[in-house]
Image (cartoon, rainbow, N blue to C red):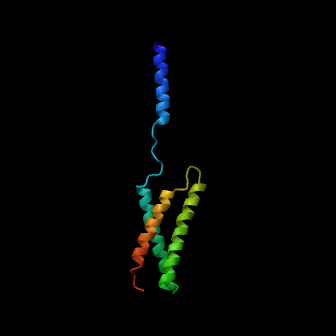
Amino acid sequence: MNSILNLCLAINIFYGQIAAPQPHPDAWFGIDKIKHFFISAFIESLSYSALQAARVHHRAAMTGAIGITIGFGVGREIHDQRTPGNFFSVRDLTWDLIGTGAGAALLSHTIR
């Protein structure tokens, strides 16, 4: 009887470990997501300023800055995917896009 109880307990522990929900390794909120947001907004602002300094018209400078920022975000995720132990994170890319949108909203009100 004791061996049957031990077997049931072992099976319960084994299947309990498999069935237990695992935390997602890439949460929607955290320090990393704040970094993605602000770095994207910074890259967009820097790109826009450089394009404006090169005398590019406002609308074209805005479009170029958005493209450059999205390119950096996708490039970072591709780099992460190639690094052992990392993966392409749609959540990081989402925060990059949110930062890009916030940067565009602020830059759209700049003096032209």
Residue 33 image position (x, y, % from top left): 43, 59
Locate residue 23, reporting x and y percent: 45, 44
* Residue shown at 48% from the left, 33% from the top: 17
Q: For the C terminus, give its image quadrant.
A: bottom left
Outermost residue, right side: 82
**Could you say where residue 83 lies in the image, as x and y percent from the top left?**
59, 54
In the rendered image of this protein, does residue 4 appear above or below residue 17?
above
Q: Pinpoint residue 108: horizontal percent, then vertical percent.
A: 41, 79
Q: Quadrant of residue 76?
A: bottom right
Q: Residue at x 50, y 86 (%)?
A: 57
Query: Horizontal placement of 32 versus 80: left or right?
Result: left
Which one is nearer the viewer's eye here, 92 or 12?
12
Residue 19 to residue 50: above or below = above
Question: Which residue occupies 52% across, 65% down?
Answer: 73
In this view, the residue in front, 2 or 35, is 2
Count of numbered badges drawn on the protein: 0
